[in-house]
Amino acid sequence: MDSEPSPETIIEAELVDDEPTYEFNIQRDNEIDITEIKLFIIEKTNHIIYEKIISKDSEYWNKIKIKFQNNFDIFYVFLESVLVKRTNDNLRYEIIVENFINLKLELYYTSELFSFKIDMLITKQKEKIDILKEENDELKKKVESLQEKVESLCKIVDIMGPQYMRSIIGADKLYANYNLLGTIQSISFDNRLSKVIPDYSRAPVEPVKYLDELKGCEDSHSTGGEYSVNKQNVMEWKHSGNPPDALVWSKTAWELIKKEKQWDID
């Protein structure tokens, strides 16, 4: 075997009977101390390209390296000798068409003292349109995921907005322990827990339902009172009916801020 093969070797396989003509392209990443080998088989009739990339740390190499004295450079020389130079009668190959996607390449070394055979599956190279389609599908998934996250984030912001407005006027603690929203249940902390969380004697055991009803009260005017917004974007209390509470004020104030700042998060 030639100890100094070229970095890239291409040769056309001979036509045998009606079998297709194949061209081999073998590439390596370095002249010596090779760490990656690229093997391309081109079926010339339909110009179909099959490829296999073998790295020094690949599972495939680990399975066959004992046949090449654990030397990846020797393996490259072997491939070049059997597929390209073909001057050694002890070396030969066969190509078997497995299906439209795969070729099976069988490589043989035979001698009186020592013989072996290795197989490798060579996969059809993806065409540009297939690669673009995969990239497009992956991009669609990322966009859909991002859209869902943005929608969720907008909902969170819209829920927390009124609560922030209530905190501005110091009314957030009143509704943080709110227990006057219909069917909401609450649980009293025992003495041990009250020492861990002082100043909170009651808390909802149905936080999701509690939050839904709290938001519902903001939307439906919990006391029946209402604020209107005049042309100067100033909130005014409609004096017909009950006076609005902090829930109504915070919801109206938040909607006004979103409109004024042009925050489209609905």
Image (spheres, rainbow, N blue to C red):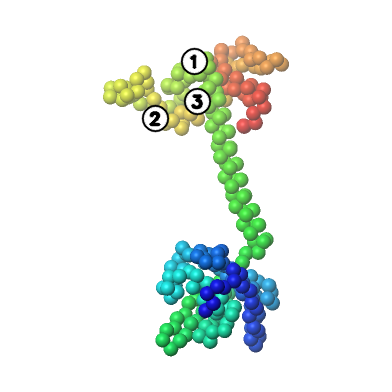
Q: Residue at x 67, y 61 (%)?
A: 128
Residue assigned mark 3: 214
* Residue 190, horizontal then vertical, whole percent: 29, 24
Quarter of the image holding residue 186?
top left
Mark 1 is surrounded, within 10 Å at the Cα level, by few (under 14), some (14 to 19) or many (20 or more) other residues, namely few
Q: Residue 147: which disc?
A: none
Residue assigned mark 2: 205
* Residue 118, horizontal then vertical, whole percent: 48, 77
Mark 3 is surrounded, within 10 Å at the Cα level, by few (under 14), some (14 to 19) or many (20 or more) other residues, namely some
- Residue placed furthest toward the right: 231
Disc number lying in front (1 or 3): 1
Distance, label 1 to label 3, CA atoms, is 17 Å
Query: Mark 1 vs mark 3: which is more N-terminal?
Result: 1
Element type at marker 2?
Answer: loop
Q: Residue at x 34, y 20 (%)?
A: 198
Quarter of the image holding residue 176?
top left
Task: Answer whether residue 50 is visible to the viewer in this image.
Answer: no
Distance, label 1 to label 2, CA atoms, is 24 Å
Element type at marker 3?
Answer: helix
* Residue 60, horizontal then vertical, whole percent: 47, 68
Task: Answer whether residue 113 is visible to the viewer in this image.
Answer: yes
Q: Residue 170: which disc?
A: 1
Disc number lying in front (1 or 2): 1
User: Hey, what amino acid is under mark 2?
Assistant: Val
User: Hey, what amino acid is under mark 1?
Assistant: Gly
Element type at marker 1?
Answer: loop
Q: Are marks 2 and 3 in contact (CB under 8 Å)?
A: no
Query: Mark 2 vs mark 3: which is more N-terminal?
Result: 2
User: Hey, what amino acid is under mark 3?
Assistant: Leu
